Image: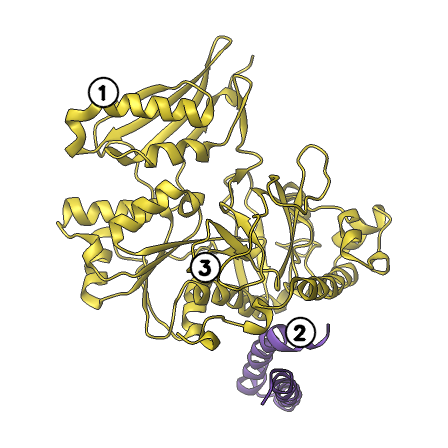
Amino acid sequence: MTDKQKYWNPILEKLPFEKLQELQLKKFKNIFQWAYENSKFHRDLYNNAGITPKDIHSLDHISRIPKVEKSMMRDIQSKEPFPYGDALCVPVEEVTEFRQTSGTTGQPIYQPDTWQDWEWWSESWAYILWAQGYRPKDRVFIPFGYNIFVAFWAGHYAAEKIGCEVVPGGVLDTKARILKIKELNATALMGTPTYMLSMAETARDQLHIDPSKLGISKITCAGEPGASIPSTKKRIENAWGAKVYDHAGATEIGAWSFECTEQPGGMHVNDALFLIEIEDIETGKIINEPGKKGKMIITALDRIAQPCIRFDSKDIIEWAEDPCPCGRTFRLIKGGVVGRSDDITKVKGVLLAPSAVEEVVRGIKGLGDEYEFIIDKKGDTEILILKVELSPEAAEKKQNIENQLADQLRLKTNLRYNIEFHKYGTLPRYEVKAKRFKDLRKKKPN
Amino acid sequence: MTGEKLIQDMESRIQLMKKTAEELKILGENIPAVERNAARILASIKMLEINISHYLQI
């Protein structure tokens, strides 16, 4: 591969960071002005905070602008024009795309996009797929039923834009999808980490097909943090004999982050299309140095129908220390999205991110891919229940595995767990976003 | 052709295409097949501006 072919856009992806910041400031001022002029919600929000577009002269000024939270969008969308409300910046007749959020954290949010916005969505995904080695020769199989959620729609359009052949595998069941991958010699897959593991299990157990022999060379994951959790990534890579790459995006934001073929232990943020700020959860100050985790506040710099300006994503990220060997100047976030501020919880006085439990479970040979993690309360005592499955071939080693699991959990999370072994294949299998973590304390009074 | 010269040449063609597509959209206002396809072309041209033209504005 020549250097000219390495980047989707070498001009922006190798731009010195100071120039990228100049670009971000110019574009931020444009989108801020656009929202101020075209949306009553945005104009009122900024006027009430005493800030207008003429007050923004440097990136440092941006942190003065009020953030937008998902909960505010719910109120906005109860207003006119139906069904989007007054954050809409274009006439309703210019909206060509409807999507909505999954509603995991409450009432779903509607997302309008113009055709230009939709081109932008697929453009942001084209950066991702090109960086992950997708090329026109690839035949990309997408084992996902597209619907009102944005998941994989833009991946499909971006793969087409790149020139790949795209096979939409939505209406097929898992076995039929695997057989179609085999029949067509597909070279790449897109899916959630959970479903990639589940598909591999179905191939092995029900079709007696070794998924690593199917010729898949790369898998792009989305929807869950798994592909950035080293032990989960390794399981998927081993199962499929393929490179597994993470990406992060959201309906209200766009596809803002991606892992490149160097797999540097983190993801690039697309600094040309987004402005990403990390906010200290306790002080609210912006973190610019590596090694300190905080909450991501994000602006999509080119999205016009329903602008995303200083959106409080709740994603927990941190800047990486070193640049990526791939040569991109787009910054790296260490370990991808490491959690969500509304998922990180205090148990017995210890801060716990559920992803730490997944990293341990998936790192132990002999355990199945599925698990369930529950925090509950009996009287005043908080209890942690971890349900796991033993792989059929590891039945003889149960005690050893249990000891190993308890030790690793204590080491990584400083907590003790009630470990329950369930029969292989009996824990729930998921196709889209898995719900493995349940905090039952919130439903119980003290 | 050197890098900056190449980028300038691409930019002049992007702006030419944009002007042409905008004119076509107006000329085709009574012919949906022209007007709507020109609108789609303009959305694609916007992606060229994001990738090239915006760089030249800094």
Q: Are marks 3 and 2 in contact (CB under 8 Å)?
A: no
Amino acid marked by disc 2: Tyr
Query: The residue tagged with tag 2: helix, strand or loop?
Result: helix
Amino acid marked by disc 1: Gln
What colour denotes chain B? purple
Residue A332 is marked as none
Measured Cα–Cα span from mark 1 to mark 2: 61 Å
Q: Quadrant of the C terminus of chain A?
A: top right
Query: The residue tagged with tag 1: helix, strand or loop?
Result: helix
Q: Is residue A245 left or right of residue A124?
A: left
Point out residue A357 in the picture as x, y percentages from the top left corner: 41, 31
Residue A260 is marked as 3
**Would you name the residue on which mark 1 appears?**
A399
Q: Residues within 10 Å of mark 3 (few under 14, many from 20)?
A: many
Point out residue A122 in the picture as x, y percentages from the top left corner: 50, 67
Point out residue B32 in the picture as x, y percentages from the top left corner: 56, 84
Point out residue A287 in the picture as x, y percentages from the top left corner: 68, 44
State the image quarter where residue A183 is shown: bottom left
Q: Chain of mark 2?
A: B
Q: Chain of mark 1?
A: A
Q: Is residue A289 left or right of residue A109?
A: right
**Would you name the residue on which mark 2 appears?**
B55
Same chain for mark 3 and mark 2? The answer is: no
Q: Is residue A403 above or below residue A112?
A: above
Q: Residues within 10 Å of mark 2 (few under 14, many from 20)?
A: some
Amino acid marked by disc 3: Cys
User: Which chain: yellow?
Assistant: A
Measured Cα–Cα span from mark 3 to mark 1: 39 Å
Q: Is residue A65 left or right of residue B13?
A: right
